[in-house]
Amino acid sequence: MPARIERPVLSVDVVLFRITEDNNELAALLHRRASRPFAGAWALPGVAVRIDETLEAAAKRALEEKGQLAAAALHLEQLATFDAVYRDPRGRTISVAHIGLVPLSAAGPRGDVAAWRPLSSIERGGLPFDHGWILETAVTRLRGKLRYTNIAARLLPETFRIDELQAVYEAVLGRRLNRANFRNKLLKIGLIERAGVLSEAVGKRGGRPPHLYRFTEEEVGAQDRDFV
């Protein structure tokens, strides 16, 4: 008799990052689970993949349905596959996790079932399933890519002040950076360029209005070496 073919559930979970407006921290989008298991717990947005949709489409649906966030124009990329046998108490489930980034200016989430949570407020072991491990993996990936790509552009508006850019790097890396060295190095390697001045504002000490910058490349791409 041939062996019975078992069909595990294929799902996606999404770690969506942004920088908080009040204290420049890295935050992740969480939703409050409405059903068992772990009803009422805060978790990463995730859904089972439908037979007629791609993984990316499922990831966007997870953000829309669970995260209450419009996902059409978000930056999304696959993170890793999580396949621990007992990761879900309901049965065999394999998750292809995704990482996403949104700028501070992005709207949402809508309603009160989803919220941005600074990483400093998420206790180790405080998320259900293996979502804590997925979140840690996503943070490690983002920190690595920040050191050799222009992915920080997905956390900022098209033009920005140098202090806003530095705040993003410091929030993700979790350490302070020397402002002069930071600006000069990014300009020298051609990662960013000047894009004008913020004419309606001046620096905190008065004087000339601050410069605005932008990334020289629109698409996310790697540099020849680490630059932070």
Image (spheres, helix red, strand yellow):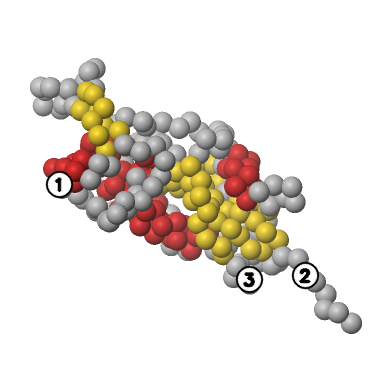
**Marks 1/2: CA distance?**
56 Å
Image quadrant containing the N terminus: bottom right
Nearer to us in this view, 152 or 115: 152
Q: Position of residue 189 (x, y in %)?
A: 23, 45
- Using residue 58 as the reference point, say whether residue 161 is left or right of it: left
Whichever of callouts 1 and 2 sits on the residue coming sooner in the sequence is 2
Q: Are marks 2 and 3 in contact (CB under 8 Å)?
A: no
Whichever of callouts 2 and 3 sits on the residue coming sooner in the sequence is 2
Which residue is painted at 69% across and 67% down in the image? 92
Characterize the local packing of mark 1: few (<14), some (14-19) or many (20 or more) Cα atoms within 10 angstroms.
few
Pointer 2 residue: 6
Q: Position of residue 176 (x, y in %)?
A: 21, 50
Which numbered tag is attached to residue 14? none
Q: Is residue 163 visible?
A: yes
SS under mark 3:
loop
- Name which residue type carries label 2: Glu
Q: Nearer the viewer, mark 1 or mark 2?
A: 1
Which residue is painted at 67% across and 59% down in the image? 10
Which residue is painted at 23% across and 37% down in the image? 163
Q: Position of residue 215 (x, y in %)?
A: 31, 37
Characterize the local packing of mark 2: few (<14), some (14-19) or many (20 or more) Cα atoms within 10 angstroms.
few
Q: Is residue 32 visible?
A: no
**Marks 3/1: CA distance?**
48 Å
Say if 89 sits above or below 175 in the image. Answer: below
- Name which residue type carries label 3: Tyr
Q: Residue furthest bottom?
A: 1
SS under mark 2:
loop
Pointer 1 residue: 181
Pointer 3 residue: 86
Nearer to us in this view, 209 or 19: 209
- Name which residue type carries label 1: Asn
